[in-house]
Amino acid sequence: MQNSTQQEDLSRLTLLGREAKPSKSLETFPNRHPDRDYVVTMETDEFTCVCPMTGQPDFAHLQIRYIPDASILESKSLKLYLWSYRNEGIFHEHVTNVILEDLIAVLSPRWCKVTAHFGVRGGISITVEAEYTKPGAAQP
Amino acid sequence: MQNSTQQEDLSRLTLLGREAKPSKSLETFPNRHPDRDYVVTMETDEFTCVCPMTGQPDFAHLQIRYIPDASILESKSLKLYLWSYRNEGIFHEHVTNVILEDLIAVLSPRWCKVTAHFGVRGGISITVEAEYTKPGAAQP
Amino acid sequence: MQNSTQQEDLSRLTLLGREAKPSKSLETFPNRHPDRDYVVTMETDEFTCVCPMTGQPDFAHLQIRYIPDASILESKSLKLYLWSYRNEGIFHEHVTNVILEDLIAVLSPRWCKVTAHFGVRGGISITVEAEYTKPGAAQP
Amino acid sequence: MQNSTQQEDLSRLTLLGREAKPSKSLETFPNRHPDRDYVVTMETDEFTCVCPMTGQPDFAHLQIRYIPDASILESKSLKLYLWSYRNEGIFHEHVTNVILEDLIAVLSPRWCKVTAHFGVRGGISITVEAEYTKPGAAQP
Amino acid sequence: MQNSTQQEDLSRLTLLGREAKPSKSLETFPNRHPDRDYVVTMETDEFTCVCPMTGQPDFAHLQIRYIPDASILESKSLKLYLWSYRNEGIFHEHVTNVILEDLIAVLSPRWCKVTAHFGVRGGISITVEAEYTKPGAAQP
Amino acid sequence: MQNSTQQEDLSRLTLLGREAKPSKSLETFPNRHPDRDYVVTMETDEFTCVCPMTGQPDFAHLQIRYIPDASILESKSLKLYLWSYRNEGIFHEHVTNVILEDLIAVLSPRWCKVTAHFGVRGGISITVEAEYTKPGAAQP
Amino acid sequence: MQNSTQQEDLSRLTLLGREAKPSKSLETFPNRHPDRDYVVTMETDEFTCVCPMTGQPDFAHLQIRYIPDASILESKSLKLYLWSYRNEGIFHEHVTNVILEDLIAVLSPRWCKVTAHFGVRGGISITVEAEYTKPGAAQP
Amino acid sequence: MQNSTQQEDLSRLTLLGREAKPSKSLETFPNRHPDRDYVVTMETDEFTCVCPMTGQPDFAHLQIRYIPDASILESKSLKLYLWSYRNEGIFHEHVTNVILEDLIAVLSPRWCKVTAHFGVRGGISITVEAEYTKPGAAQP
Amino acid sequence: MQNSTQQEDLSRLTLLGREAKPSKSLETFPNRHPDRDYVVTMETDEFTCVCPMTGQPDFAHLQIRYIPDASILESKSLKLYLWSYRNEGIFHEHVTNVILEDLIAVLSPRWCKVTAHFGVRGGISITVEAEYTKPGAAQP
Amino acid sequence: MQNSTQQEDLSRLTLLGREAKPSKSLETFPNRHPDRDYVVTMETDEFTCVCPMTGQPDFAHLQIRYIPDASILESKSLKLYLWSYRNEGIFHEHVTNVILEDLIAVLSPRWCKVTAHFGVRGGISITVEAEYTKPGAAQP
Ligand SMILES: [Ca+2]
Ligand SMILES: [Ca+2]
Ligand SMILES: [Ca+2]
Ligand SMILES: [Ca+2]
Ligand SMILES: [Ca+2]
Ligand SMILES: [Ca+2]
Ligand SMILES: [Ca+2]
Ligand SMILES: [Ca+2]
Ligand SMILES: [Ca+2]
Ligand SMILES: [Ca+2]
Ligand SMILES: [Ca+2]
Ligand SMILES: [Ca+2]
Ligand SMILES: [Ca+2]
Ligand SMILES: [Ca+2]
Ligand SMILES: [Ca+2]
Ligand SMILES: [Ca+2]
């Protein structure tokens, strides 16, 4: 089947099944259905960074949704990418936008949205939702 | 294994049904209400295929929604069709689109959407949503 | 109050408070607020019919929503009507449309939608949603 | 602060903090933010009336939503108003519309919606949703 | 009815299974681990019988739990057995005990408990829990 | 079947299927399985009485559980019995005990427990649980 | 009925229906069923005190359960009592025990348990459960 | 990275990590992604003010959502700001609008919505939703 | 720390971090806290085997709980072990006991319980719970 | 009040309100109610350590329950203590026991239980529950 997973799709992937360490490099494989606008959602309960003011750990639930163009995000490289924030000092509002921008750079998606829900501090939880639409593309 | 199910255990059972096997063939019956756009949703917690890279099993919750035109999908043939993926190596994003395309081929529906929610790997879950609309047809 | 329940409203009702048996006859009482588009939702966990192929019982959760025109559906007659399917052999997709058509015939509603959610068979559940809008009327 | 609660706002209220009895009179206090369309939702699990046909008690969950114009509904007077239905015989579809009409009369709201969800009778629950929009006003 | 399921609709279907019918006969297969007290739970949302007083349908959620001795209950025969109550007039409290007694007769279990949760009638739901312990056996 | 519902069981029931009004009289039918300790649970969301101090309506969720001895509680008579509290002024803690005592008087059960969960007043909800065990009888 | 609410029960109550202010005084009315061990549960989402170290507000969900002896706690006086902690600086573990001790002093209950669930601080929530049993009395 | 948190962002913040007391002053830090419309949601279960009529405490769940323009709201200053309502007498409908107006004043957001859900009083809960859109800006 | 993870603990593990294939071999690492009875729970939504009668796939949620003695179960080897059932024909009641027996053989635990919850077939779900206690050991 | 929080209780606390960094030091304040066995539960969704085999991050929900003797655990020092595991390589079963042992050392509690629920890896989640009881002390 031409529209299914093929041997050559695997050749670009360097991280899947190898030894793991934190990495800013996101990997992709080819989209076999570029004729169709479809939505991929990746979700994790396991994101942590640190407060730039106090240095204390922050924890978030992260959701990434996108409509692929030519490329699909490989999930193990995403795991290593998210790991790279473990010791980074950054505000909630900033990190959500930076992740979105890194995804745009590597995927060049038709549409993409990042939602980060951070745990309670001082009785208050914070959720940040940032969204991107390629010029001329439709939203889901 | 003496403590597991044995051939003789089956001999007492007279009601449990006939043999079935995986099949790529989807069956249909006639739509008796083609004058109306209505939506059929079929849902299962029991879909499994394998990772094309590592050969390990993947599991998904699958939802199929469609507006029938002349034909309605018979559910037992769908069960056997989904069974046929049990030993197929295919990425999440691809299998969702391939199922959609097979449904389009056999049902020629006015509209159809396939949603596959795959379990957590490396702390990350993946959901893929692919949708089709027949030219000139309305969406639900 | 002219816009509230009146003695004469009760005169058309023959089934409420009488002995019960399955019946295809749906009863109505007058709508006292025809100047307003409002939505009535009737819901039950207690619908059963039989598979036309195997003769085995099927069970569904049923939801009926409508915008009344001149008439409102009396709920006891609906109960007896649904009871009448108890021994009828009919596919899920068909029975949902037939119920919708019977409701249209007796209520002549401005809008009506029937949703039937059938229990799991072969690991797969089926939900059917059929909808009707009177020419010139608005949807909710 | 001119836009907050003021002493004079309290002067119109005769029921708050007094002895209680059922009452058809709904009281209001002035809206201090009439320049803005905002939504107030009042909800109760404690509404009961009686069936006009059988005299038996009915119970409902009631939700009232509105966009105030010049007036805001005082909640204790609403409690006493709802109490007044305790021994009234009235169909579900009628009482929902009558409450909406009484609210329109006293509040002259920009928009208002009443939703009443009545408990199961004969295996069937009934929900009625009635809505009003002042000419020229926007919905939420 | 032309718009309902028709005989010819079935002719295209080759996979949908053979005929079944209601049966009071419960089948078993041998327990391969009689040295261990373990618990089997069978649960269904699809039980219906009729009220012996009014003839109207009743619906229940049914749970059967037991510790097998020499035999294990085959689930398809249970399905056909429960089907046999479809037209039987019997009170909730009685049917729960009768099912328990039929299970004791065919399984001779070390322990067994039947729980039947019947839907709301007159605003009241009824649940019946009946339990049996073989002399000398332990409960879970 | 001697252990199932019988024609004579129905002869004691005067309220089922008749015209309804509030009543302090609770009716019973014979227990066909007195050799077994089993538990019956009756539950309703539809109980209301009034505050003896202020005269305002109170609402409760009510659960009645019992192990029958010679008699089983008929549910329609329970509905009418609960209706009789509609205009009675009584504290939460008292009404729960009084209902328990009336059940003991008519059922002479082996064990009985009444749980009443009253809605929020002044930010505080109240639940009362009262229990009775016949001398020599076991609890569930 | 001697075991129900009586006119004289109301004479001890001075706070119900009067003007309200925070108060350390808890009021009671007589238990009409002292022959029975039964459980009363009072629950609120509306408790706040302040941190003795930082002066910042803390919020808790509070549950009080007790078996009355001669007295029952009146709920409006409990509301005013809880209000009295609004500006008190006290650790979670201490306030839970102090409330229990105040309840013991005024109710002399057979058994009492106070559970306080405080909101998240520094990513950590705290729940404190303190319990008392009168010598010779049973627990629920 | 220019679009991430920077040292200078911290210089405007005077409340984070200092001694805390209630304050009407809301603090902000610069938005590093003003080219994008994104949504920030702040939520707390810990808001309390007092009834202007009776002086009794009210409790609410509060949700603040906004699209930042040049500034982002610092969450500790929000905590202290909400604390400042602890002893203020103000109606639910008013306080929700006043908070919205204070947020507009300090953030000058492109869009902002405040939702306050107040606990049950007299059996009725109240939720207020107030929303603002800067002229020319889009809503989420 | 002697009671924490040590380099030598890793030496027995041959499957973690290697290429994966189905395997009946379960691996363990040393328990560093054998002086204490503590409970380990391993849970998965991803278990599948086939029906020995019809050859069709079955799916289960699996929970394994145990009190370790000298050994702890390594989770990757468990994943490969569960994978090995993918094409095995075995009844629900048997496979649950066989898994328990394999765990007892490799772990020699003080206590162990396996719970398998299989999806609905013919409207009925089946759950099997099998438990083992080493002579002289306590249960949790 | 001698049994409430006192000025001297605060003198032992060095971390509350100060600058934060990871720390193995747990701090306590005096128990003012040592005559009573009561239970304190501390819970967090924000615990992370690393896999000793692969170096990858693990995430857990942590619950600590204990009956204090002379000392109560201060929650900010617990936060810093949990932070100290952020870069530690340790198996799930070991870290749960080590935390328990550190709590025993600093609190000398009458009873203590640590429950750690780790996220899904390879489709499998792991929960570890370790418990301690001081000789002669009761469990909750
Ligand atoms: Ca394609
Ligand atoms: Ca038609
Ligand atoms: Ca009208
Ligand atoms: Ca159901
Ligand atoms: Ca204003
Ligand atoms: Ca065995
Ligand atoms: Ca019997
Ligand atoms: Ca309710
Ligand atoms: Ca008494
Ligand atoms: Ca709350
Ligand atoms: Ca930017
Ligand atoms: Ca140890
Ligand atoms: Ca599942
Ligand atoms: Ca003490
Ligand atoms: Ca004390
Ligand atoms: Ca989490």
Image (tube, coloured by chain):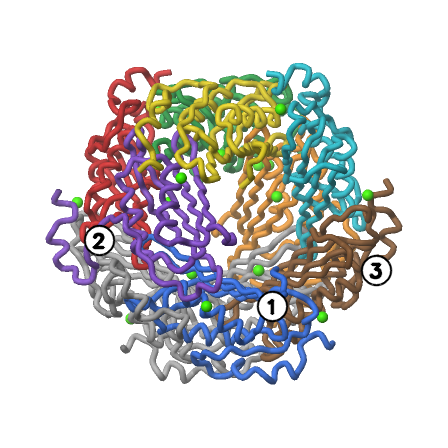
Chain colours: A yellow, B purple, C blue, D brown, G orange, H cyan, I red, J green
Kindly report the distance in space between the C-alpha atoms of the residues bearing marks 3 and 2: 75 Å
In the picture of the structure, the residue carrying the numbered disc 1 is: C110
Residue B28, numbered label? none
Residue for badge 3 = D14
Say what amino acid the circle numbered 3 marks: Thr
> Mark 2: few, some, or many residues within 10 Å (few <14, many ≥20)?
few
Q: Is mark 3 within 8 Å of ligand 5?
A: no
Q: Position of residue G130 (x, y in %)?
A: 54, 41
Mark 1 vs mark 3, foreground winner is: 1
Q: Position of residue G77 (x, y in %)?
A: 70, 51
Say left or right for I31 vs D126. left
Report which quarter residue C60 is drawn in.
bottom left
Residue type highlighted by circle 1? Arg
Q: Are marks 1 and 3 in contact (CB under 8 Å)?
A: no
Residue D88 in percent (x, y) is at: 68, 74
**Could one spot residue J12 in this view of the protein?**
no
Report crowding for label 3: few under 14, some 14 to 19, many 20 or more residues within 10 A (C-alpha).
few
Task: Check disc 2 and report the residue beneath it.
Answer: B20
If the image is split into quadrants, where does the N terminus of chain A sit? Answer: top left
> Which label lies toward us, 2 or 1?
1
Query: Circle 3 marks a residue in which chain?
Result: D
Residue C59, percent from left and from top: 38, 64
Callout 2, which amino acid? Ala
Is disc 1 surrounded by few (<14), some (14 to 19) or many (20+) residues within 10 Å? many
Q: Nearer the viewer, residue B61 or D6?
A: B61
